[in-house]
Amino acid sequence: MILVEPSELDADGCVTLRDARGAHALGVLKVTLDQPIRVGIVDGALGTGLVTALLADGVRLRCAFDTVPPRPPVDLLLALPRPKVLRRLWAQLAALGVGRVILTNAERVERNYFDTHLLDPTGYRPLLLEGLQQARDSRLPDVSVHRQFRVLVEDDLDGLTGTATRLVADPAATLPIRHAIHSRPSGVNRALLAVGPEGGWNAFELDLLRSHGFSGVGMGARILRSDTACIALLALVHEALR
Amino acid sequence: MILVEPSELDADGCVTLRDARGAHALGVLKVTLDQPIRVGIVDGALGTGLVTALLADGVRLRCAFDTVPPRPPVDLLLALPRPKVLRRLWAQLAALGVGRVILTNAERVERNYFDTHLLDPTGYRPLLLEGLQQARDSRLPDVSVHRQFRVLVEDDLDGLTGTATRLVADPAATLPIRHAIHSRPSGVNRALLAVGPEGGWNAFELDLLRSHGFSGVGMGARILRSDTACIALLALVHEALR
């Protein structure tokens, strides 16, 4: 699938792609004239683009859009991982489907992790778009970065996520995710999953989360790298909500 | 955790580590004299190593072993991904826990993927050990590489995996993994999960798997990259078997 920005479409729904997307259409999809391909508007509807011209360096499409995909029902509260891990994660989070990514400080997050350009929209947005195109989705996750964990949990979290089943991944917890999700109050259809830093949340952080409605959930005794854990846990939450 | 090879231990259970593991003990774990740390024997028991000497370039440990971890109850049949993805996968597969990794050809696997050194034990073994140490496990997955998909499925698979619930990930399937696992015959406690190439299995391959006992299972409509899909699916199979 190819995603276009709203501003790229002219009044007739036509768009000319001369960048990596155009090269992808020519070189990988090997499109031909009049061929329909999947398209989407960033944060908008999905539809079909008809190839109306093959150019030396790209393609021209006439697009028609129909369905607007729903916002993914899971938000992620993640202790900021090291830049190498964060770089790998962005596209995978968008592909798995996350409504909002809330990145936070924690005791075991190193301060210099906050210096990465991967926390600027110019750094992460292309990676999120790559993941969305892979998964054939158009809903860009909202992203926010928080340097004060306590302020985030006590003051900001309710406004950021609204009503949701709150879960915190904890290697010491035995409650499976599906039990936690299935015992939620009726009418609560979203989940907020908290994933700690490589060394885990400290006792204060875990207590603060628990006192703000987070239930500890576990996947067994294995300790996983931050990115592996995020993917595995998000898959389990999505499956339990289906 | 630190893994040692059986041949590295002397008759008293002592081992001197002067390589990356020794540097890790000194620099990351910052061990002190007489401190106990988690150790394991590759493909053997887990236990405790007492620091008996701090050297300029490593540490000496006196180890005692007790529990032998069980073999993970899931095997993976994976269409060989491109080398970049395979490199990322090895450690994550070992960390999640896989009894056997069966890598296979398929129509949509490019032939040159088989040229990578990541299919030699010297290429993948260090990555598997890295994942095991992360997850505090010692059971090295068995690995085999198969260039003929049909021969593998028709002739070799029974001998490689024994009795197991056979599942094939299929974006078109709607059966959730936990339903497929929960409806298995009693006494069958292992699962074999098949994951296709980036473009999917072709119709012949899918039919061959189905006719050899594989049930199609799905995670929803999103198309995931091979490595993301493996991690998500393995998490779901492990959780359903727990």
Image: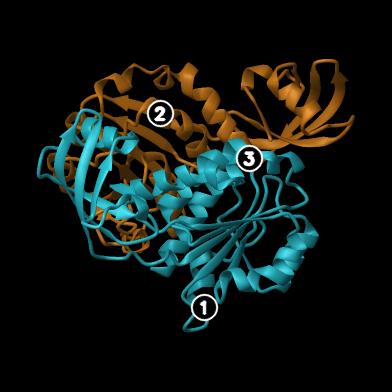
Chain colours: A cyan, B orange
Within 10 Å of disc 3 (Cα), the crowding (few <14, some 14-19, many 20+) is: many
What's the chain of the residue with tag 3? B
Within 10 Å of disc 2 (Cα), the crowding (few <14, some 14-19, many 20+) is: some
The kind of residue on which mark 2 rests is: Val
Q: Position of residue A217 (x, y in %)?
A: 59, 63
The kind of residue on which mark 1 rests is: Ser
Residue B215's label in the rendered image is: none
Q: CA distance from mark 2 to mark 1?
A: 40 Å
* Residue B240 visible to the viewer: yes
Q: CA distance from mark 1 to mark 3?
A: 31 Å
Secondary element at tag 1: loop
Q: Which is more toward the observer, B161 or A108?
A: A108
* Residue B70 visible to the viewer: no
Q: CA distance from mark 2 to mark 3?
A: 20 Å
Q: Which residue is mark 2?
A: B143
Which label lies toward us, 2 or 1?
Answer: 1
Residue B136's label in the rendered image is: 3
Secondary element at tag 2: strand
Secondary element at tag 3: loop
